Amino acid sequence: MQLISFFISTLRVSFIFVLLLSAGSAISQEKKSKKERKAEKQAKIDEMIRLEEEGTIVYPKQNIFGFHLYSDGWGAMYEKGKQKNTNKATLYSIEFGERKHPKEVKLYDASSGGGFIFGQPLIYGKENNFFFLKLGVGQSYLIGGKGNKNGVSVSAVYKGGLSLGLLKPYYVDVVDPITSQIVAAKYEGGDGKYDNEFLSNPLGSSGVFKGAGETQIKPGLFLKGALRFDYGRYNEIVSAIETGFGLEYYASEMPIMIRNEPQRSFINVFVAIEFGRRK
């Protein structure tokens, strides 16, 4: 009986000892695993620091705002980018702006051509304001890295997508020949009530928002190619100049100026100032 009790006690002690050894081994492995993870994390940080010192972009996302000055207008853009690797990024963008006709001339006094006398500045012979809204997707490809923090990186940028042309009638203030009241009028193809006054004696623009409720939407497509020069000292900050060309084509003609042939396609060149952050 004593022998059996001794055997049972020995088994209990052995079992407890094995449990303690297992627990100690698990704790030791966990500590080792934490150390390994910490070492791996530090190694990644060190690699990022090294790449950053060499001027390599190591941030996976970027948000950029830009202002474009076109040969035929202007545009304001927001772009979101996702880095695929150190050389390529996928870009998503939205841009709003305005196309202008090369014959547009802003007058401050239609009667004398002198200083501002009455009404808002006038663009004589303008039929419609042509705004656009672009939704695009594309890529940027790194051609040359900065080499160091004070260098300049050069990337090729190409995009394409949907372009919505927004045609808004251009209203001017004229004098009603019957009532002598000042009224806002748009050009109606030569048969309108105030078309003669619109062309012969406009007083000034009725304002950029006049006629907004009559805006027509004209769908189209666009392509864009450019070079982006990023001169930002720190890689997490985007400071860039971009220059390139654009092509737009719309499903219908876009009349801007009276007595000038309306166009469906628009080719332009541009320069842009861009800024933003990477993270």
Image: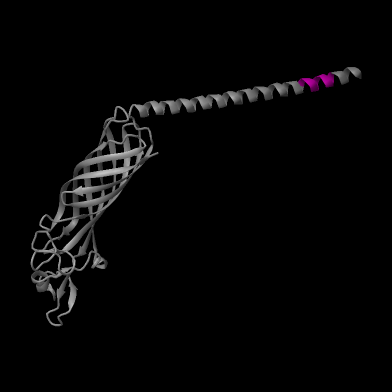
Task: Tell me which colouring the rendered structure shows.
Answer: one colour
> Which of the 4 image quarters holds residue 147?
top left
The image quadrant of residue 53 is top left
Q: Is residue 184 above or below residue 74?
A: below
Q: Residue at x 14, y 70 (%)?
A: 203
Picture coordinates of residue 68 (x, y %)?
23, 48
Furthest-right residue in view? 1
Residue 69 position (above or below residue 256): above
**Residue 59: horizontal and vertical position, in percent?**
38, 35
Residue 101 higher or lower than 214, as above or below? above
**What's drawn in magenta, residue-wise?**
7-14
> Does 183 sit above or below residue 16?
below
Q: Out of 133 and 48, give the one closest to the viewer.
A: 48
Out of 220 and 171, give the one closest to the viewer.
171
Position of the C terminus by quadrant: top left
Which residue in the rendered view is the most extreme toward the top? Answer: 3
Q: Residue at x 12, y 80 (%)?
A: 177
Residue 249 among magenta residues: no
Residue located at (67% from left, 23% from top): 24
* In the image, residue 10 lies in the stretch drawn in magenta: yes
The quadrant holding residue 255 is bottom left
Total numbered labels placed on residues in the image: 0
- Point out the residue furthest to the bottom here: 179
Residue 184, percent from left and from top: 19, 72
Q: Position of residue 141 (x, y in %)?
A: 28, 35
Of the 4 image quadrants, the one containing the N terminus is: top right
| SS assignment for the magenta stretch, majority | helix
- Residue at x-position 22% and y-position 66%: 207
Left-right relation of 68 to 29: left
Q: Is residue 149 left or right of residue 18?
A: left
